[in-house]
Image: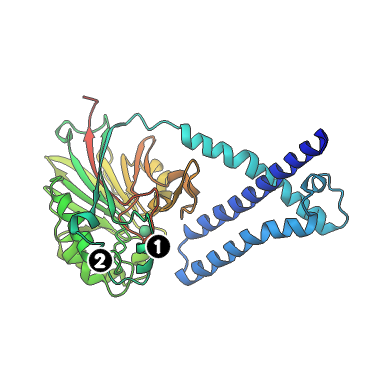
Amino acid sequence: MDQLSLFQLALIVVLCLGACTGHAALFVVSLNWWYSLPIHRSLLSLLKQLHVLAALAGPALFWLAFGLRLDNALLFSSPGLWHTVLAGYLYICLAVGLIVFPSVTLWRLVRRRPAALLSNHTRMVDVAERLGYRPIGRGKHRLMARLPGNQVFRVDFAERTFCLPQLPPAWDGLSILHLSDLHLCGTPDLVFYQQVMGLCRDWEPDLVAITGDIVDSDMHHRWIVPALGRLRWKEAAFAGLGSHDSWHEPMLVRRRLRRLQIRVLGNSWAEIKVRGERLAVIGHEGPWFLPEPDLSGCPQGVFRLCLSHTPDHIRWAQQHGIDLMLAGHNHGGQIRFPLIGSVFVPSRYSRRYDCGSFHEPPTLLHVSRGLAGKEPVRYNCRPEVTKIVLRRRAL
Ligand SMILES: [Fe+2]
């Protein structure tokens, strides 16, 4: 094979990889966007199947139209309208696959953690090891929990310290236990949650914040009290509901939480005193529960803590002067690939706010990877509970 042929071969390989990557990325972004909307779960399931089919059909379509000679397709040399349209789409896929996707991935790899994050210490606890068996339970997707290497029972207990200069002096060192996405549905078993909540007690948090997706079945509301009943706090506990709660008798979820003295704000706000200082706590359960919170009467100049199931409300939070927003919903993607990271993230921003902390002034956003998920599958993305410690300045 002469040098020109080798060049052509290399070009064809790059074009094929780029086109397939770009096509898949476009459909993943589309699916992520659909999953950020308040639509019925059966429609979401149908959309997921259609997107998977379309993602697989793309390479086949390119193959049927152009064979392997994608380089010829780029010249629009093929006859007919459909070939021309397909060649145009091929250009878009190549731009996404060879430029946009690698650039975004590289940016995600090299981006710095926000300066407001002073420290991040994580201790992993293997709950299955503690119990001496895997608490798989009897959930619908329990077989998935048995997959080799599945990290579903390996919980990260993360302690993150944030610097917020606007904090009242009395709150220096204030701690918040952030829990999200318990997805009570049979797998993991109740004992898993009881173990985790028992360990969270050792943190002795001032506040507890739960950011939704507490149940994921019509049968497991009865687990709320025995699971979360183990929690303790010094000042107050708050919770907001999420997308999966909205599908499973949300009033029942709210009632059970209130039985535990956990305040459920819905789409509203409340003012409390913490260490003698005023704190405005805002719940945002949109878009699954509407209307979104009205902050017209919420006092100005008071620290604003927002519990939002989805981090997609980050722009809303910035516009409403939220100091600290806690969110979940995205589960960190649940499966994170080497170098690439998360792929499926049910957000209008796709994987931008998949997990971690983001400082978008005036708002500091913390997105939990959550404790579980409807499908009990996690790779390179362990479940997480977080103790957030607030400081006025770096020590
Ligand atoms: Fe969730």
* Res 153 → quadrant: bottom left
Q: Position of residue 390 (x, y in %)?
A: 23, 36
Say which residue label 1 marks: 288
Position of 55 relative to 382 (above/below)? below
Q: Residues within 10 Å of mark 2 (few under 14, many from 20)?
A: some
Q: Amino acid at mark 1?
A: Trp
Q: Position of residue 218 (x, y in %)?
A: 31, 74
Nearer to us of marks 1 and 2 is 2
Residue 374 in view in this figure: no
Quadrant for ligand 1 reads bottom left
Write the residue at 51% across / 55% down.
Answer: 32
Of labels 1 and 2, earlier in sequence is: 2
Q: How would you rate the neighbour count of disc 1 (Cα within 10 Å): few for under 14, some for 14-19, many for 20 or more?
A: many
Residue type highlighted by circle 2: Asp
Q: CA distance from mark 1 to mark 2?
A: 27 Å
Residue hosting label 2: 189
